[in-house]
Image: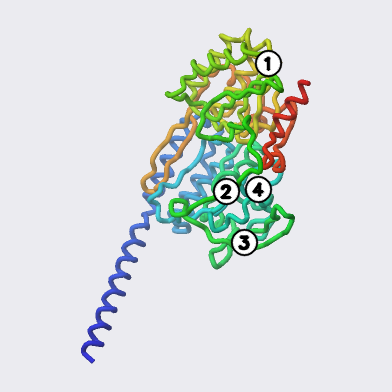
Amino acid sequence: MKKSLSIFALLLLLVLAFGVASCKKADAQKVQPEKLCYDIQKIQLDMEYSALKDLYDPEPFEQLKADVMAGKIDRKECIFRLKEIFCSYHVVHLRLAVAQDNHDFSSGIFPFVLMCFGDDYHIITAAKKYEKYLGSKVLEIGGIPIEESLKRLSKYIPYETPSGLKHSFERGLTYDTMEHVGLTEKNGKIKVKLQKQNGAVETYSCKPVVASKTKFSALPLKKENPMLTVQDRSVNYGIKSSKEKGTVYVHFNRVIGNPDYLVTVFFNDLLTELGSDSYDTVVFDLRYNGGGMGDFEILLSHLLYDNKAEFEKCNLALITTGRTASAACWFANDFLRIFPRTVIFGEETGEAIFNYTDIPMTNELKNLQCDFAFPHQIDDHVDELYKRAAKVTHSDIHRGTMPDVEVHEKFEDFINGEDTIYNAIYDYFN
């Protein structure tokens, strides 16, 4: 009997200890309203002195502070409200990133990575236990058409152009955001409707996963294409050439230098390759280029201008998509300024023709446990872009550089080692 009581007492102590620990953890996540308002005020000060100062509207922030002080919302809801306010500006460089140690948010993510092909989305990476769905076309998420789910998520995903929004689905989707917009089930799972590669349609529910604890599988291609090194995201820039098609492909995945392959050496290699055969077309591929460093972009522009005569001997093509943003858009604009006869293939860029393309400033918000990134003024050293922006209205600058020839990637070409856009360029110039 005494032994039973001892065990019972031990269990009771463990339960109480767990309860106290849980309470301490819960208390640790509670933040005084005044402190949350202090961080919101810091954001407001940043906005007042940012490149968005002429567009800054303090009213939504003041209302948010009033709701915080009234106890209507907690820290997590405060963060979502801030994200929604920022997204209303349609500026990619204006965003709020949740710190890893913020326990208000889980580490769960959608177990798939999607890739956009026109208006379709296919699974190209999946948690290993779901790898049988690789290549499937996603029809619905959370029981609603994928277009509607994207519309819901757009309240919390910074974007500038329709094409940029469309490609934003290619980023990893966090479970908390999906739950917040009603794309999850009560049991914590996510319902997905797919059309498999054999045409069969299947609906099932999957669990969110933690990236650091999950093995992922990539979609195997039926045929590799040696020209498509652009898909190797670890390479900032490189060259591939096709003597058969008389084309040199210049892959730019990042506007960042590579110490193991200096950009000056890269340009020398490019010019050497152009002079080694009778090439008639040069393609600068920016489809996966999300940007980089402004100073490096200026160096690229100088190298282009210094070798202008050599490049003008060829047909020149640029490839852009909704993934092309930030310094990559700046590069595309400079390229068009230097080579006005360039033909753009693909889609509208993900960032606007002019929209605060410099490196964003970052401010740590300790009470919100977030990092706030905002654009600073760049008109002092990007005069031409600023002049272009001054000629249009606020709403108009939120459209990107448009293609001369609109071409959408096709999943069937992708998986069979073909490149829809490269083929369109070859057909155009021949």
Mark 4: few, some, or many residues within 10 Å (few <14, many ≥20)?
A: many
Indicate which label's residue lies in the foreground, 1 or 3.
Answer: 1
Q: Is residue 83 above or below residue 298?
A: below
Residue 67 seen in the current view:
no
Spot occupied by residue 319 in the image (x, y as percentages of width and height)? 66, 28
Spot occupied by residue 270 in the image (x, y as percentages of width and height)? 57, 17
Structural distance between the alpha carbons of marks 1 and 2: 36 Å
> Given the image, on which type of amino acid does mark 1 rest?
Tyr
Q: Nearer the viewer, residue 306 or 251?
A: 251
Q: Quadrant of residue 160?
A: top right
> Given the image, on which type of amino acid does mark 4 rest?
His
- Residue at the far left in the pictured view: 2
Q: Looking at the image, is mark 1 or mark 2 earlier in the sequence?
A: 2
The residue labelled by disc 2 is 125
* 362 sits left or right of 288 in the view: left
The residue labelled by disc 1 is 279
- Residue at the far bottom in the pictured view: 1
The residue labelled by disc 4 is 122
Q: Quadrant of residue 288?
A: top right
Q: Looking at the image, is mark 1 or mark 3 earlier in the sequence?
A: 3
Spot occupied by residue 40 in the image (x, y as percentages of width and height)? 43, 44
Indicate which label's residue lies in the foreground, 2 or 3.
Answer: 2
- The structure residue drawn at horizontal position 65% and vertical position 48%, both measured from the top left corner, is 122
Q: Quadrant of residue 43?
A: top left
Secondary structure type for disc 3? strand
Structural distance between the alpha carbons of marks 3 and 4: 16 Å
Residue 47 seen in the current view:
yes
Q: Is residue 182 above or below residue 328?
A: below
> Residue 191 bears which disc, if any?
3
Q: Nearer the viewer, residue 150 or 115?
A: 115
